[in-house]
Image: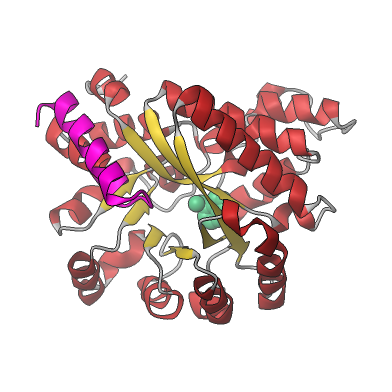
Amino acid sequence: MSAHSDFIAGLPKAELHLHIEGTLEPEMMFALAERNGLTLPYASVDALRAAYDFGNLQDFLDLYYQGTDVLRQRRDFYDLTMAYLERARAQNVLHAEIFFDPQAHTRRGVDFADIVEGIDVALRDGAESLGISSRLILCFLRDLDVDDAMATLQAALPYLDRIAGVGLDSAEIGNPPEKFENVFDRARELGLVTVAHAGEEGPADYVRGALDALHVARIDHGNRSLDDDALVRRLAASGVPLTLCPLSNLRLGVIKDLKDHPLKRMLDRGLVVTVNSDDPAYFGGYINENFAAIADALDLDRGDLARLAKNSFKASLLNDSEKAGHFARIDAYAGG
Ligand code: ADE
Ligand code: ZN
């Protein structure tokens, strides 16, 4: 329990870096396995949770993709998304920009329509019943080839009214942003916003590549940016936000200790950074637990936390008047 837990709990927040497949809690994994007549290679929820001991990103990805196998039907995607929205709302998340990985499902024979419709209907229902606004961002798996990404973009064409942007995730090292330049060019022609994971395990050069080749509106993670001073100055001057994920970084060995996390140094250098949960079912916490852990580790005060919450809306895809409404809500809560 952090000294700031109550303050964080009441703080209005946006979540901008959240893989919907990473919200698949072990209990739901077992329930969906049963619904779909599958047997998991774990005896119990506890045995599954005990396997969540990752040395690096690839260790995690192996389990994450294995976990997605229980997602088969439209209603599985609906239930997964609705469960996340309910948890998010309980943590005072008022806006969520949600990643999904269609290739992790279509390669197993799931219909693109079932994935998007299941998620999208839950997002609409969540807007109505919980008051959470949202955007959906399609991520390409960067360890698959470019043709697969282009075919996935093609498959998304009938659903572009429900998809706000494209992103890039999965195994980073050896899969630089430039590999996807043509796919992202096409996505931008189609009116989609672009974002990309960069500088999580990969070098600062991949952050630069995401800016130059993919013209991203945000960098997801971006931890390694601090290795390159000119890049930091560029990020500060342009205001391109970084969506940071403290507990993810700790659990994947990107940092050894939360005290080493770059968030405070980035704030001090004038970068627009936000706090997010990435894959909360796997990393031991949703957004409030991420806020609390980083607040304690880096000795953040209420002013820092309110600034991080404001950054989350500032860095979002909401329009200016929606952002202004959220800033006012945070000021009213945090005392200006
Ligand atoms: N897919 C889901 N979570 C991810 C992460 N943290 N990095 C890269 N790909 C991911
Ligand atoms: Zn991520």
For the stretch drawn in magenta, what is the main secondary structure?
helix
Residue at (38% x, 70% y) in the render: 207
Q: In this picture, is 179 found above or below 303? A: below
Residue at (72% x, 43% y) in the render: 68
Give the quadrant of the N terminus.
Answer: top left
Q: How is the image coloured?
A: secondary structure
Q: Is residue 68 left or right of residue 214?
A: right
Q: Is residue 21 magenta?
A: no
Q: In this picture, is 234 found above or below 161? A: below
Q: Nearer the viewer, residue 71 or 128?
A: 128
Numbered marks: total? 0
Q: Is residue 251 visible?
A: no
Q: Nearer the viewer, residue 183 or 248?
A: 183
Residue at (36% x, 48% y) in the render: 318
Q: Is residue 298 left or right of residue 281?
A: left
Q: Is residue 202 left or right of residue 175?
A: left
Task: Specify start and end residues of the magenta stretch as a single range.
Answer: 311-336
Q: Nearer the viewer, residue 144 or 150?
A: 150
Quarter where residue 140 is shown: bottom right
Residue 29 image position (x, y, % from top left): 72, 30
Q: Is residue 334 magenta?
A: yes
Quarter where residue 213 is shown: bottom left
Work out which residue is located at the far right of the displayed protein and give it: 37
Give the quadrant of the C terminus.
Answer: top left
Residue 183 image position (x, y, % from top left): 58, 76
Q: Is residue 252 visible?
A: yes
Residue 303 image position (x, y, % from top left): 13, 35
Work out which residue is located at the far left of the displayed protein and give it: 336
Residue 173 image position (x, y, % from top left): 53, 69
Q: Is residue 108 left or right of residue 140?
A: right
Residue at (74% x, 22% y) in the render: 44
Q: In this picture, is 223 found above or below 133? A: below
